[in-house]
Amino acid sequence: MHRGWQDRLVSLFHPVRRYRCRSKACGWQGRVDASRTGASPWARVARRPGTWIIACLLLVPPAMLLAGGEWIEQHAGTARPTVDGRDLDPGESSGKSPLQPTAQQRYSNENPGELRTGCVWAGPGEQPYVGTLLDALTAARLPSEIIRKLVMMHEEGFINDRLEISRAGIHSADHRRSFGYTTKAMALDGTVCFNTKIDLSNETTGSADLYEVTDRNYQRYTIMIVANGGNVAVLQEQSGR
């Protein structure tokens, strides 16, 4: 017969079955010790619901500890690298070398472990850049989102304006915009030099393509790629022009 809740409660500690006599003249029914069957002791123990309840209770604490450890690992994450007290964007290098050491050793005589700053550029054709646009913008520490947009614009040939480079500095072809004599960062040889000054002779001139993008905070990023030499520079437009 189907067991009632009392039979099931008893079976948590001692397995029992409920039977009744099929003879109408008998009318007997009652519990029978299920452990009297011919099964092995281990099989009888495994069939007891109480065995599985106890096993589950014993497994709950280790499972909770394991789940807690995974949650901490997922939410703690890895600390973002910093340089000069500033969090680096994805794709930036935390080392002081603007480009990978292998690129610097191949193309530049500078110490690859030193950050270049305050360089002087003599104009188009001088110290041509021998690297990719992605490497130059990454070394210049532009945000990764801005880098992706600028690289895509360059690959698609989408140019915002043309620039002229002369003794008077960097300015747009219509002379309505001026970017002065100092770039925020400029790719020279196989590396990037920050705060690079432009010092051209009276006869030296050149042209460059201008690319501009704006981030979600409406901050504008402007770069130029020099036609003769492929130098990549991050520019800052002069106010009042």
Image: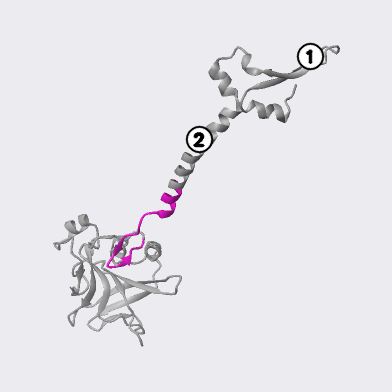
Q: Nearer the viewer, residue 66 or 221?
A: 66
Q: Nearer the viewer, residue 168 or 240?
A: 240
Location of the C terminus by quadrant is bottom left
Q: Give the residues drawn in magenta, as a range.
A: 70-89
Picture quadrant where residue 104 is located: bottom left
The percent position of residue 208, horizontal first and vertical second, equals 30, 72
On screen, residue 72 above or below 47:
below
Q: Nearer the viewer, residue 26 or 138?
A: 26
- Please, what secondary structure does the residue beneath circle 2 have? helix
Q: Kindly check if marks 2 and 1 are in contact, taking CB atoms under 8 A apart as contact.
A: no
Location of the N terminus by quadrant is top right
In this rendering, position of residue 28 left or right of residue 73? right
Find out whether residue 76 is within the magenta segment: yes
On screen, residue 50 above or below 225:
above
On screen, residue 47 above or below 241:
above
Name the residue furthest left: 109
Say which amino acid is labelled 2.
Leu
Per the image, the residue denoted by label 2 is: 58
Find out whether residue 122 is within the magenta segment: no
In this rendering, position of residue 47 left or right of residue 106? right
- Please, what secondary structure does the residue beneath circle 1 have? loop
Per the image, the residue denoted by label 1 is: 21
Say which amino acid is labelled 1.
Cys
The percent position of residue 238, horizontal first and vertical second, equals 32, 83
Q: Earlier in the sequence, mark 2 or mark 1?
A: 1
Q: Nearer the viewer, residue 113 or 158?
A: 113
The percent position of residue 236, horizontal first and vertical second, equals 32, 78
Graded by Cα atoms within 10 Å as few (under 14), some (14 to 19) or many (20 or more), the crowding at tag 2 reads few
Q: Residue at x 33, y 71 (%)?
A: 223
